[in-house]
Amino acid sequence: MDVLWETPEPLTVRQVSGQLTERDLAHTTVMTVLDRLAKKGFARRERDGRAWRYRAAESREAYVTELMLNALDQTGDRQAALARFARSVSGAEARALRRELEALESREALPAPGPGEDAPAG
């Protein structure tokens, strides 16, 4: 997935294999892993002649967000898990979270557009 996340254009199996220089993987192994990633929805593939080209289905951030939400679903007490998480982040991470929460609250405080009106830009 790292190779797919780091490359904006779709890649063939051979191109992915070529970027995995630190590991000596067989072409068929890379092909199998990419096929499984596509079947699970982590990668998307498109035909390019006889070959498939693969790209990440979502950004790394979206994938990690989904993992975090799934982890929260596993808890019996989401608020307790969030509180424990908040106590474990660094000061810079806490400030980033605070900024995002404040921005979210600001957007939620805006009135909904009436019929025929455009939503506020933001």
Image: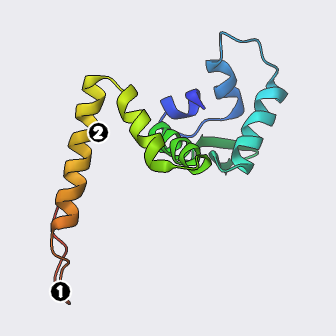
* Left or right: 38 as drawn, with respect to 108: right
Q: Looking at the image, is mark 1 or mark 2 nearer the viewer?
A: 2
Nearer to me, 117 or 8: 117
Residue for point 49% across, 29% down: 6
Residue position marked by numbered label 2 in the rendering = 97
Q: Is residue 102 above or below residue 98?
A: below
Task: Evaluate whether residue 122 shows in this view.
Answer: no
Judging depth in this view, the residue of 94 and 8 nearest the camera is 94
Task: In the rendered view, tell whether residue 96 sits above or below residue 91.
Answer: below
Q: Is residue 7 visible?
A: yes
Q: Can you give x and y, in whole percent of width and height, for residue 102 in the image?
A: 19, 49
Query: Which quadrant: the C terminus?
Result: bottom left
SS at circle 2: helix
Q: Amino acid at mark 1?
A: Gly
Question: Residue 89 lies in what quarter of the image?
Answer: top left
Circles 1 and 2, Cβ within 8 Å, touching? The answer is no
Amino acid under disc 2:
Leu
Per the model, the C-alpha gap separating discs 1 and 2 is: 31 Å
**Residue at label 1?**
114
Q: Image point 56% across, 42% down: which residue?
A: 67
Q: Is residue 40 above or below residue 105?
A: above
Ranked by sequence position, the earlier of labels 1 and 2 is 2
The N terminus appears in which quarter of the rendering?
Answer: top right
Near mark 1 (Cα within 10 A), the count class, few <14, some 14-19 or many ≥20, is few
Colour setting: rainbow
Residue 93 at x, y percent in the picture: 30, 29
- Circle on res. 25: none
